[in-house]
Image (cartoon, helix red, strand yellow):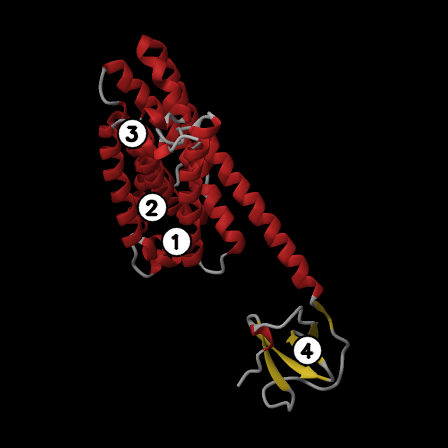
Amino acid sequence: MHNVLAYDFMQRALLAALLVGCAAPLVGVFLVQRRLSLIGDGIGHVAFAGVAVGALTGQSPVWVALLFAVGAAVAIELVRAQGRTSGDVALAIMFYGGIALGVVVMARAGNAASSMNGYLFGAITTTSRSDIVVFAGLAVAVVIVTWILRPRLFAVANDPEYAKAVGLPVLALNTTLAILTAVTVVVSMRVVGLLLISALMIVPNASAQLVARSFRSASILAVAIGVACAVGGVIGSFYLQTPSGGTIVLSTVVVFALLAMTASIRGALAARGHRYAEPHSHEHGQGCGHERVEHEDHHDYLHDGHLHAPHGDHYDEHRPVGPGPSRRPSR
């Protein structure tokens, strides 16, 4: 079996996958919070038009695509902020207009259009050294800006009205997020492809939210999944002789399915240890005389060999499924 690191093009491919695996989920977590999961697809369509224009004019497809993508991202945020049309309508216009312009220009590009599939679906093995330098610079910029603005981006994504009330520049932050998304799309187009990049932004975050208990842990786990799937997908595509973009995205879907099944099984096991307790006159609470026991995020009271948890106007009965921290007496 060949060593993937023995080939220069695979070294570049793995480095590009590492960069994209870090940047895409880190930006995507805020898109999920804002319910803009499909904006990456829309910007990808416009970036495709930029690639076609670059091929037609003989300019660098990467830089022209970046110009088109950033312009579209800023435009859609301004349209949404002015309230002249809904976010869904603006996204739809960007979807259809971008792909239509790309198809028309591509038809005029002649032989230069032969490389378009690599931008649409990814062609990581053809990534050049100059591409890596550009993508590395853009990816590092995305990661640094996103990490610095993380608390503000979260506040705006979670509750824009409150963020505006406390003085945060909501429009500027939303526009910055849109620009970060556009840059991430362009960075990722040679790795995953313009038609698939949105999946690498969204699916790792959807997977992380199945098991994480905080925004911070979900973000870290999403990046870990993104890096593992991107790098693993490239290695898998090398040995399986499959397209890198499709292999990467399928690996994220497999991870999501496995975590979803794990969460479902865990929920079923937890439900087995929870049942409705019979009503009784004694009222459990602080100083009631019964031992108080930690149980996940609340306290139970040990009463006649049963663990009773106050819940509204009744008590739930918890049957521990085994020894562990949930059985530690509180002090």
Q: Earlier in the sequence, mark 3 or mark 4?
A: 3
* 84 w.r.t. 319: above or below: above
State which quadrant residue 158 falls in: bottom left
Q: Nearer the viewer, residue 301 or 97?
A: 301
The kind of residue tagged 4 is Leu
Q: Earlier in the sequence, mark 1 or mark 4?
A: 1
Q: Classify 10 Å Cα crowding around label 4: few (below 14), some (14-19), many (20 and above).
A: many
Q: Does the residue at mark 2 contact the one at mark 1 (Cβ under 8 Å)?
A: yes
Q: Which residue is mark 3?
A: 8
Decide if residue 189 is on the left or right side of residue 261: left
What separation in Å lies between label 1 and label 4 (alpha carbons)?
42 Å
Q: Which residue is mark 2?
A: 174
Which secondary structure, mark 3? helix
The kind of residue tagged 3 is Asp
The kind of residue tagged 1 is Pro
Instruction: Please tell me which residue is depicted at 28% across the width and 16% down the height of the picture.
Output: 55
What separation in Å lies between label 3 and label 2 (alpha carbons)?
39 Å
Q: Earlier in the sequence, mark 2 or mark 4?
A: 2
Q: Earlier in the sequence, mark 3 or mark 1?
A: 3
Instruction: Please tell me which residue is depicted at 29% across the width and 59% down the height of the picture.
Output: 167
* 301 w.r.t. 243: above or below: below
Q: Which residue is mark 1?
A: 160
Instruction: Please tell me which residue is depicted at 34% across the width and 27% down the height of the picture.
Output: 47
Q: Which residue is mark 4?
A: 307
